[in-house]
Amino acid sequence: MTNEKKTEKLLPATAIILAAGKGTRMNSPLPKVLHPVCGKPMIENVIWACQQAGITDIRIVVGHGGSLVKTVVEKMGVQVFHQAQQLGTADAVRAAQIETLSGDVIILNGDHPLIQGEDLVQFFKNFREEKLDLAVITCIKKNPGQFGRIIRHQGVVRAIVEAKDASADTLKIKEVNTGVYLAKSEILQDYLPRIQNLNSKGEFYLTDIIALTVDDQCKVAPIVAAPRVSFGVNNQLELARANKLVFNKKARQLLESGVLMLDPQNTYIEPSVQVAPGSVIHPNVYLKGRTKIGPFTSIEPNCFVVDSDLGESVILRANSYLENCKIQNRASIGPFARLRPETDIGEEAHVGNFVEMKKVKFGAKSKAGHLTYLGDAEIGTDTNIGCGTITCNYAVDRKKYKTKIGNGVFVGSDSQFVAPISVGDNAVIASGSTITKDVPERALAIARPQQLIKENYVARPSEETPNNNEEK
């Protein structure tokens, strides 16, 4: 259901991901690398790219907000190292215990969410084929801005100069440093301790390793990549742009695979979502997480779907919210329906407007047309749930209880089921009933006060008391 390319795996390698920066320009209390891109903290995208490339030794260097970053990334099977003081990128790399490294190493930034596993594979391939000691990933940018400039002499890279330390002539250079490096582990172990902090900020710049290794006639070369690789997030505007770029890429993939999207620029589908060809996605739809959409399914505007599985030829009408639920083939949902976790809607069933379900197994061809709440319930096949029905599943003891309603049951409007309770097949529940006892199959259950009629309760107009304020 997806056309994501499989990424070629690498030979053993190590990745060091720098995530210690404060991210002052984000103007946010959240550590920069935890800001979300398409539903996930951006650093997770970088880790995922490494894992897709087959890198198993992944080291994260944290600093500002380190404990929070650690909580997020450790579940992905990475190692976390702490940079005690933010003294520059070279100091950050040293914090990853470089003395324990062996083999080839790639250094990445945790705020570069657009990098992909296939990029890393290609970088390592070039690095190894050219038998390099050190490589810097570069790209050509029309407006280099604050990127470090690549200094070449007769085509050979000689150094990297940070923009804030560059001359006017150096700032005219269009080839820039993406912040990604590849190195043999012994190069890092030998040269990082030699880097000095003789610059305007008094920091230890990783960029200085280029000049040091070149001077010692190590084999150093740039590897030119697509400008996308250089994209880093430093403020909220760039974060929004990163989200848009990822959403647009996913939209293009789906369009190419045969999914009909009426307005791709205003449709938001996360990379992890699978959508089968022949489905129709309307504007302002958000599909999130592990969601799977089957063929010929239609999702109308303003729907939000999280970690849910929609089968073939499902109709999801406008303004519906689905979370961790399953919709079987040819069912119809909404408009304005809310399906909460662990809800399973059967084939050809109908869930109408302003219906909420939670932890419900709803049988094939059953219907709940409108204004209904069903929670902790099992509903059989071909059962009709009338308007205003409620399963009273939460008791005074703060426990949830289950309602079971069989096949072919007719539930009249404005009925309440006080769980735990069971209703047999083909039973009928009279409108306005509050059911507190089990109902046998084929029975009629009526549980409401006897209707009382008092005739002439309302006075006729001619018998009303005159208004004393009226003129006589």
Image (cartoon, helix red, strand yellow):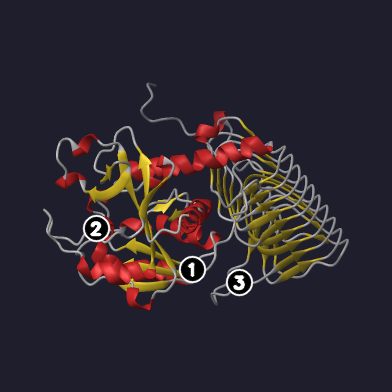
> On the rendered structure, is 162 left or right of 355?
left
Q: Amino acid at mark 1?
A: Met
Residue 276 placed where, x, y %? 70, 44
Q: Quadrant of residue 92?
A: bottom left
Residue 457 placed where, x, y %? 61, 43
Q: Which residue is mark 3?
A: 400
Report how many numbered discs are placed on residues in the image.
3
Q: Which mark is residue 76?
A: 1
Q: Report, in whole angstroms, how far the alpha carbon at label 1 lies from the one at label 3.
A: 34 Å
Residue located at (74% from left, 39% from top): 296
Residue 191 placed where, x, y %? 26, 67
Residue closest to the eye, 251 or 343: 251
**Marks 1 and 3, the one that precedes in the sequence:** 1
Q: Quadrant of residue 60?
A: bottom left
Question: Is label 1 in a helix, a strand or a loop?
Answer: helix
Give yes or no for contact between labels 2 and 1 (Cβ–Cβ under 8 Å): no
**Marks 2 and 3, the one that precedes in the sequence:** 2
Residue closest to the eye, 300 or 446: 300
Q: Which residue sits furthest right?
A: 442
Sort mark 3 into few (<14), some (14-19) or many (20+) by Cα contacts within 10 Å: some
Q: Amino acid at mark 2?
A: Asp
> On the rendered structure, is 252 left or right of 444?
left
Q: Which residue is mark 2?
A: 215
Sort mark 1 into few (<14), some (14-19) or many (20+) by Cα contacts within 10 Å: few
Q: Which mark is residue 297?
A: none
